[in-house]
Amino acid sequence: MAWSLKREDATITEWERSDGYATVRLRERGDGRFVARLDVMEQAVDDRAYDRVVLDERAAAEERAAAWREERDLDD
């Protein structure tokens, strides 16, 4: 299943999986570090999951977010 960009502004970038049961979010913290967050809801066919990491650089957070999207992509 495809991921689509649902929100992108000065605060948050968020992708949602096409089934609506998973999101990946990237945001900058007040201290200049970045948070990447994965949330797979309970109803999802690939089981519930939540993960959150804090990284020093945006590029590293973007890489983590991309990896989660790839790992949690579902075949149609």
Image (tube, grey):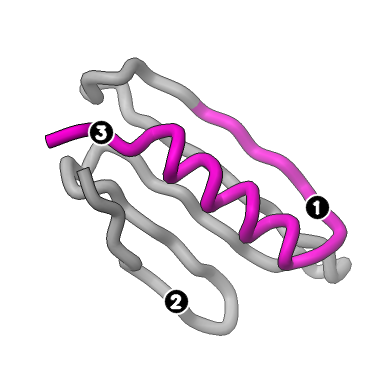
Query: Is 75 colored magenta in this rendering?
Result: yes
Which label sits in the foreground, 2 or 3? 3
Q: Is residue 62 left or right of residue 18?
A: right
* Amino acid on which disc 2 is placed: Glu
Which residue in the structure is indicated by mark 2? 8
Sequence order check, earlier mark of 1 and 2:
2
| Rendered location of residue 73, percent (x, y) | 33, 38
Query: Is 74 colored magenta in this rendering?
Result: yes
Q: Is residue 61 above or below residue 38?
A: below
Q: Is residue 72 left or right of residue 1?
A: right
Which residue in the structure is indicated by mark 3? 74
Q: Is residue 15 left or right of residue 74?
A: right
Which residue in the structure is indicated by mark 1? 55
Q: Residue at x 44, y 61 (%)?
A: 14
Q: Most extreme residue toward the top, as rendered?
A: 47
| Rendered location of residue 21, percent (x, y) | 25, 37
Alpha-carbon distance for marks 2 and 3? 23 Å
Q: Is residue 50 above or below residue 23?
A: above
Q: Residues within 10 Å of mark 1 (few under 14, many from 20)?
A: some
* Amino acid on which disc 1 is placed: Leu
